[in-house]
Image (cartoon, rainbow, N blue to C red):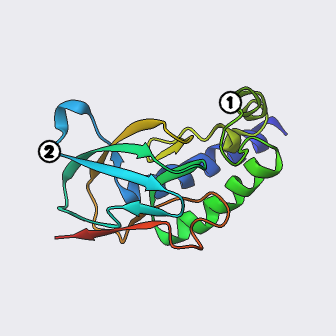
Amino acid sequence: MKIFIFLLLFITNMGFSASMKNIGEKGESFEVDRVIEIKMYDNYFEPNEINIKKGETIKFLIKNFGSLVHEFNIATNKMHLSHQTEMLKMMEKEILLGDKIDYKKMKELAKTDHSMAHSHSNSLLLEPNKSGEIIWKFNTETKLEAACNVPGHYESDMIVKINFN
């Protein structure tokens, strides 16, 4: 039984790791080629389109100017659609509370359900008037977008189109 559980976790993590490599990788501060400022508003980003070169490492400086919690998540369309179930679960578990995040509950629930930790290097979850950064190396030309996956936001087109030059 222990071997089965280990293999299940190992294979799941390999699949997630492989999909992450498909979209790029966490960049390092000494590798940054360019800085792009992203402003989050309620249900849209500024800018809503960015141009990237394959191999470029971008530091995204992200600020939430909206009145709601928002996410900036770099992924494929398919990955966003899959991630939305986790975000819905975070709302159902009252981790995401409209205009704030219950970090204490997030940490507690993440002990038994890792998806509740929301700690991926391609993603940032911000409360209103908060800011953060992501450094991302675009070492692939996979069709990507950055989006907010808080329930209803992706559907309202809270997406940054990522174009490769």
Total residue callouts: 2
Q: Is residue 116 left or right of residue 72?
A: right
Estimate the x, y position of residue 120 in percent, counting from the top left: 51, 42
Circle on res. 33: 2
Residue lying at 35% horizontally and 47% vertically, measured from the top left: 25
Q: Quadrant of the C terminus?
A: bottom left
Using a 10 Å C-alpha cutoff, classify the residue at mark 1 as few (fewer than 14 neighbours), some (14 to 19) or many (20 or more).
Answer: few
CA separation in Å, label 1 and label 2:
32 Å
Label 2, secondary structure: give it: loop
Estimate the x, y position of residue 56 in percent, counting from the top left: 18, 52
Q: Is residue 117 left or right of residue 50?
A: right
Residue lying at 60% horizontally and 47% vertically, measured from the top left: 69
Q: Quadrant of the N terminus?
A: top right
Q: Which residue is mark 1?
A: 103
Q: Is residue 93 left or right of residue 42?
A: right
Residue lying at 63% horizontally and 44% vertically, measured from the top left: 10
Q: Give the amino acid type for the residue marked by disc 2 in the picture.
A: Asp
Residue lying at 48% horizontally and 58% vertically, measured from the top left: 19
Q: Nearer the viewer, residue 159 or 118?
A: 159
